[in-house]
Amino acid sequence: MRLSTKGRYALEALVLMGYLNIKNKTMSLKRISLEANISEGYLEQLFSMLKKESIVASKKGKNGGYRFVKPMDEIMVGDILRAVEGSLSPVKCLDNEFCNRKQKCITRSTWQVAYDKINMIVDNISLKKVVDNYYARINAGSSI
Amino acid sequence: MKLSTRGRYGLRMLIDLSMQKENIVTLSSIAHRQDVSPNYLEQVARDLKRARYIRSIKGPHGGYVLAIQPQDIKIGNLLRLLEGDIRLTDKYLGEESILQQCIRENVYDVLNKSIAEFFDSITLNDLILTNHKY
């Protein structure tokens, strides 16, 4: 039951992008790559998934890169994680509507409650909240 | 972000055993009812036995019985035994950056705490009582 590096790197990249890019101009992956210390090739994969879910939009060309599609307080951590991880269900059974044990499975409803809790938490944390908190930490000038 | 078959099958094995009350149950009958491989279930049973959740009875009519009352088995502890832990994220190797620390405290710690509290709040008995689908 683990979040993969995809989810973790996507969050790190977007929090950093939000922090560096308050005016939401197009930002190159090279810049994010340098600041977040994540390879540009890996970021390309992540951002194409984020683009597909309309979290970021891309601009081609010399000054190309990515920007957020929505204001950061409307982008939820859950949207970001699901865009790159797929379903956040704690067991694969819940992703399978056609499990033939579904009707008699005693554990399914417990997994479902855990799944609902996970989604509820990440759907209540906005990217803006994390970016603001990062901003406060950086400006406090300490690693707390 | 998934629990492995180990955690899921182990839990189902204990549910199955608790449904059979005090009877001695063979591994193959559990495997059959639960539709899982007997060989794999045997590995899980070994872990459960070592942690004293179940006892094995030797002999021609041997098998397994539950060694702890279902109301005393916390799902959280059981999953920690079988899965290692029930965290959604690993601890960072090496030094954590301010960015990573910020995300951990705002997201991962909240998730891990909530999931641990949930699984620690339910027992095997709760699971059985809230489900009558067997």
Image (cartoon, rainbow, N blue to C red):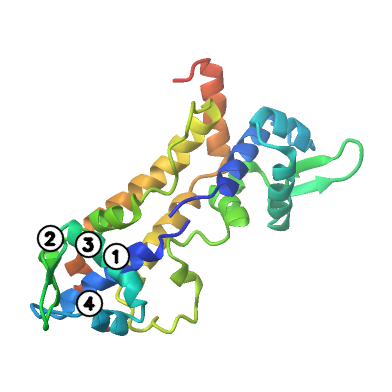
Residue located 74% across and 36% down the image: A24
What residue is pinned by disc 4?
Answer: B16
Within 10 Å of disc 1 (Cα), the crowding (few <14, some 14-19, many 20+) is some
Within 10 Å of disc 3 (Cα), the crowding (few <14, some 14-19, many 20+) is many
Residue located 74% across and 52% down the image: A48
Share a chain, discs 4 and 3?
A: yes
Q: Amino acid at mark 1?
A: Val
Work out how far the residue at label 2 is from the one at label 3, CA to CA, in angstroms.
15 Å
**Which of pointers 4 and 3 indicates the residue nearer the eye?**
3
Identify the image quadrant of the C terminus of chain A: top left
Where does residue B41 sit, x and y in percent of width and height? Answer: 31, 71
> Where on the picture, by quarter, is residue B125?
bottom left
Q: Amino acid at mark 2?
A: Asp
Mark sitting earlier along the chain (1/2): 1
What residue is pinned by disc 2?
Answer: B72
Disc sitting over residue B44 in the figure: 1
**Which of pointers 4 and 1 indicates the residue nearer the eye?**
1
Work out how far the residue at label 4 is from the one at label 1, CA to CA, in angstroms.
14 Å
What residue is pinned by disc 3?
Answer: B48
**Which of pointers 4 and 2 indicates the residue nearer the eye?**
4
Q: Secondary structure at mark 2?
A: helix
Contact between labelled residues 3 and 1, with CB atoms less than 8 Å apart = yes
Work out how far the residue at label 4 is from the one at label 2, CA to CA, in angstroms.
16 Å
Where does residue B44 sit, x and y in percent of width and height? Answer: 29, 65
Work out how far the residue at label 4 is from the one at label 3, CA to CA, in angstroms.
13 Å
Where does residue A63 sit, x and y in percent of width and height? Answer: 88, 35
Within 10 Å of disc 2 (Cα), the crowding (few <14, some 14-19, many 20+) is few
Q: Is residue A69 visible?
A: no
